[in-house]
Amino acid sequence: MSKDNRFIIRRTFSQERFEILWKKRKNGQATLRDLTEMDEIVNRDPSVRQFVLEEMENMENPADNNDLQDMLQQPVVSHQSTTDKIKAFFNRLFNSFNTTYLLPTN
């Protein structure tokens, strides 16, 4: 395409600002004020709202499979022997006794 035939992309200030905030959010640098401003722009501008909805739809599909696989995996349970359980009981008992009765009161 030649230099003379470039298309002009018209954007509003809200769309430009939303793009900047969207990049900050993706990089993990967005503050609460930035996120609040982003929310206000989404609620005001229908084209931005449509963009966000499409992005959310694209993000949910791959994540659903990963979440489902994570939920289906059984957690690893370590079994304690009886002596380990008794040791843990006495450790908790003595630690709670020490923190409750031996600390100086002001």
Image: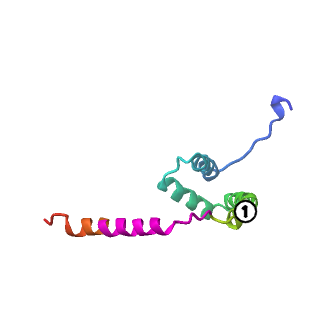
Element on which disc 1 rests: helix
Residue matched to label 1: 69
Q: Quadrant of residue 83?
A: bottom left
Tell me if residue 49 is in the magenta stretch: no
Q: Which secondary structure is most common in the magenta stretch? A: helix
Left-right relation of 39 to 47: left
User: 23 or 80: nearer the eye?
Assistant: 80
Q: How is the image coloured?
A: rainbow
Question: Residue 4's x, y, as percent?
Answer: 82, 31
User: 90 or 102: nearer the eye?
Assistant: 90
Which residue is painted at 56% across and 66% down in the image?
79
User: 94 or 63: nearer the eye?
Assistant: 94
Q: Quadrant of the N terminus?
A: top right
Tell me if residue 88 is in the magenta stretch: yes
Amino acid at pointer 1: Gln
Callout 1: few (<14), some (14-19), or many (20+) C-alpha neighbours within 10 Å?
A: few
Which residue is painted at 46% across and 65% down in the image?
84
Q: Residue furthest front?
A: 83
Q: Residue furthest left?
A: 106
The magenta span reads: 76-94
Q: Quadrant of residue 66?
A: bottom right
Left-right relation of 8 to 14: right
Question: Residue 102's x, y, as percent?
Answer: 19, 65
How many marks the image carries: the answer is 1
Q: Quadrant of the C terminus?
A: bottom left
Question: Residue 21's x, y, as percent?
Answer: 58, 49
Left-right relation of 10 to 2: left
Question: Residue 68's x, y, as percent?
Answer: 72, 65
